[in-house]
Image (cartoon, helix red, strand yellow):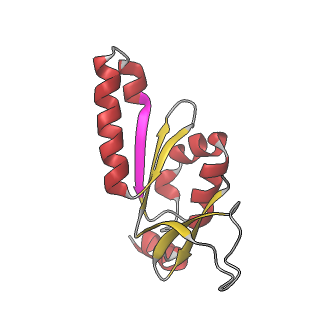
Amino acid sequence: MDLQYQLKSGSYYLYDLSEAPSPVTGQRRYKLQTSTVAVAFNRRTGKIHEHGAPARIQSWAAHTRRRLRAAGADEEANDLVVVDGPWPVDELNKCLWSSVYCRRIFQRIASLPHGKWPCGGERMRRAA
C-alpha cells in the first residue's frame, strides 16, 4: 500500500495511491475522512503502529498498553506514543513513509505549524 493523506475542504482524506483512479471520474476512492489525524508510534524506533481517526487510535493505544503491561512489557507500553491534531499534511505523509522521520518529528512537534491553515497558525503562534 502506498498511503497518502490529502487535505481537502478542511478534512484529511487518506488515499491508497497504488489503486487505480476510477475510469469514470478520474478520482481515487478514499479510505478515510477525518477532521484531525492521530498517529500511534514507538518513541524509540519511530515505527508507526496505527494512524487514522483520533478516537479509534486512542482506543487502540489504550487497549494495546493494557495488553503489553499485562504481559510484563512495561517499557514497550511506555514507548507507545499517540499524537493527534491538525498535522501539516506534508509532515504527516513523511511520517508514514519514514520511521526515522516520525521519531524526529516527535521531538519538534510543538514547533510545527497548524496543519489546516499553515500561514494563519504561524501568525497566531508568533502573536502569543
- Using the image as rendered, state which of residue 117 and residue 53 is in the foreground: 53
Quarter of the C terminus within the rendering: bottom left
Magenta segment main secondary structure: strand
Q: Quadrant of residue 36?
A: bottom left
Q: Residue 3's spot in the image, x, y percent?
A: 62, 57
Residue sitting at the far bottom: 25
Identify the residue at image location x=48%, y=77%. 123
Magenta stretch contains residue 83: yes
The residue nearer to you, when weighing 17 against 51, is 17
Q: Is residue 87 left or right of residue 104?
A: left
Residue 124 position, x and y percent, is 43, 75
Residue plotted at (71% across, 60% down)? 18
Query: Residue reaching furthest front?
Result: 24
> Measuring 71% from the left and 68% from the top, which residue is drawn there?
20
Any magenta on residue 94? no
In the picture shown, does residue 55 fall above or below 25? above
The quarter of the picture where residue 25 lies is bottom right
For the magenta stretch, what is the residue range?
79-84
Q: Nearer the viewer, residue 42 or 17?
A: 17
- 115 up-or-down from 23: above or below: above
**Residue 52 is drawn in which quadrant?**
bottom left
Above or below, comparing residue 70 to residue 106 in the picture? above
| Tally of numbered tags | 0
* Residue 32: percent from left, percent from top: 47, 65
Q: Choose between 67 and 42: the one closer to the eye.
A: 67
